[in-house]
Amino acid sequence: PILDRPLIARIVLVSLLLEGTGQAGTTLYLRNTGRLATVVFALAFSASALVTLFGDRLSWPARHRRSLGLGFAAVMAVHFVAIVGLFFVREPEYTGITLPGNETSPWIMPLLVLLGGGAGLLIVLGMTITSFAVPRRRLGEQNWRRLHLLGGWFLLMIIAVDTFDGLFREHRLIDALFCAIVLSVVALRVSAYATARQAALSST
């Protein structure tokens, strides 16, 4: 398999061992599973673009795209557990947001994370279900393409918000790497679209 359960379990376990099972440990587990998901998603979402731009030389992600997608879904399921866990282990000052009048609420940040993560999880669930032959056939090829294209861009947007926030607001330098991954995926997709469009115009 492209991504096995023991690997995900080790990432979660190490995160909790390093910081404990409270807010710090849960947050680290959330970040590390999110980073793993980012790498797997980037390979899956840029797979067709890599083939368009580089041909068989970089066709490995395209040949394993379904396995990568299912691996991403597995990581996201584990990731969502940490999102829910934040409600139970968060400290009173954990908001990350200052409200009008300098008010704070211990529920704001977990709620925002839950809403964003929940929306992303629903997208992942839809994409995962339709990766199987029967649901894909019932959905129809055109609708399937729309779901996976728009869903992919939506997930990339969520990842971008998180990684750029980590780099510029929380000053986590490691997120510079993941910002670069996000920008690389965008560049690959846009370049592949332009290349395919140019080829189509040239053939007419």
Image: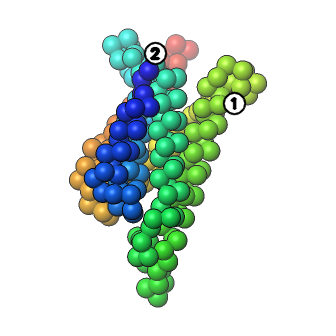
Residue 12 point in image, percent of width and height: 38, 45
Within the image, what quadrant is residue 55 found in?
top left
Residue 55 visible in the snapshot: yes
Residue at image x 38%, y 57%?
A: 21
Q: Is residue 192 left or right of residue 136?
A: left
Q: Which mark is residue 56?
A: none
Mark 1 and mark 2 residues within 8 Å of each other at the beta carbon:
no
Q: Which mark is residue 63?
A: 2
Q: How many marks?
A: 2
Q: If the image is split into quadrants, where does the N terminus sit?
A: top left
Q: Pointer 2: residues within 10 angstroms few (<14), some, or many (20+)?
A: some
Kind of residue at disc 2: Arg
Residue at image x 60%, y 42%?
A: 123
Residue 104's place in the image compared with 60, above or below, is below
Residue 65 point in image, percent of width and height: 48, 23
- Of the pair 195 and 105, the residue shown nearer to us: 105
Q: Which mark is residue 143?
A: 1
Q: Is residue 18 left or right of residue 91?
A: left
Within the image, what quadrant is residue 49 found in?
top left
Kind of residue at disc 1: Asn
Q: Residue furthest right?
A: 138
Q: Which colour scheme appears in the figure?
A: rainbow
Asked which secondary structure carries label 1, the reply is helix
Residue at image x 52%, y 36%?
A: 73
Q: Pointer 1: residues within 10 angstroms few (<14), some, or many (20+)?
A: few
Residue 164 visible in the snapshot: no
Asked which secondary structure carries label 2, the reply is helix
- Of the pair 118 and 148, the residue shown nearer to us: 118
Residue at image x 56%, y 47%?
A: 120
- Of the pair 194 and 65, the residue shown nearer to us: 65
